[in-house]
Image (spheres, grey):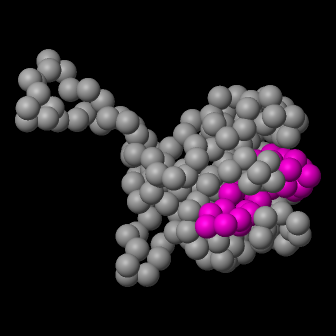
């Protein structure tokens, strides 16, 4: 992969985090979705206060990262061997995060692959944001993948993003993948839920 392709892949991977976040912004009843930086900060352990009935320890115990309850960890949904088979290469060990509003969970792999699971009804607004992206070269509906799905192409066809809706949530797969690899990975994630 060239340096330009790697930079573009990194930019699109960042977009993969923003599209569901922007789409997660709802009406006045819905708290605003955090930024990618806030999601990353939420994933970092923070010190907790000891309970009043517990003796104070010399060093506070770290809290678990904020995660979206009820949304599976995308890093644990597919065994690494299956993910390598689907994507055509070893993607490495993923790093998982969830947002404070419990709307989504994301797994970012060293290869640049980004998998996101988003709960709620933000699919249409996320597709709208994707369609308005000036870096998007092409977008198409994908039949037979979940209830509704689209695939977008970026970086001269080198990077693809699939969003597939099923039930009350949707998956997003972004990376340097062929259309077949991207849709097969999304289908495997839908099947694993």
Q: Residue shown at 66%/33% (left/top)?
A: 110
Question: What range is drawn magenta here?
Answer: 157-185
- On screen, residue 85 above or below 71: above
Give the quadrant of residue 172: bottom right
Residue 162 belongs to the span the image colors magenta: yes
Name the spot of residue 125 as percent of width and height, x first: 61, 76
Residue 1 belongs to the span the image colors magenta: no
Q: Residue shown at 70%/28% (left/top)?
A: 92
Observer-nearest of 82 and 109: 82
Q: Is residue 147 visible?
A: yes
Left/right of residue 160 with respect to residue 67 in the rendered view: right
For this orientation, the residue located farthest to the top is 58
Give the quadrant of residue 113: top right
Name the spot of residue 14 as percent of width and height, x first: 60, 52
Q: Residue shown at 58%/73% (left/top)?
A: 121
Q: Is residue 8 visible?
A: no
Image quadrant where one finds the N terminus = top right
Left/right of residue 39 with respect to residue 185 in the rendered view: left
Observer-nearest of 165 and 181: 165
Name the spot of residue 56 as percent of width and height, x first: 10, 24
């Amino acid at each position: 992969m060239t340096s330009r392709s790697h930079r573009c892949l990194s930019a699109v991977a960042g977009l993969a985090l923003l599209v569901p976040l922007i789409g997660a912004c709802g009406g006045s009843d819905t708290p605003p979705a955090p930024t990618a930086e806030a999601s990353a900060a939420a994933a970092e352990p923070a010190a907790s206060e000891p309970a009043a009935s517990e003796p104070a320890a010399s060093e506070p115990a770290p809290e678990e990262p904020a995660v979206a309850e009820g949304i599976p960890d995308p890093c644990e949904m597919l065994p690494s061997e299956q993910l390598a088979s689907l994507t055509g290469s070893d993607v490495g060990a993923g790093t998982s995060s969830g947002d404070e509003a419990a709307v989504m969970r994301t797994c970012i792999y060293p290869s640049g692959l980004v998998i996101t699971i988003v709960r709620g009804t933000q699919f249409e607004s996320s597709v709208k944001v994707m369609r308005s992206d000036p870096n998007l070269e092409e977008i198409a509906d994908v039949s037979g993948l979940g209830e509704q799905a689209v695939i977008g192409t970026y970086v001269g066809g080198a990077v693809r993003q699939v969003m597939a809706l099923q039930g009350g949530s949707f998956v997003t797969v972004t990376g340097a993948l062929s259309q077949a690899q991207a849709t097969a990975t999304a289908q495997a994630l839908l099947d694993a839920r």
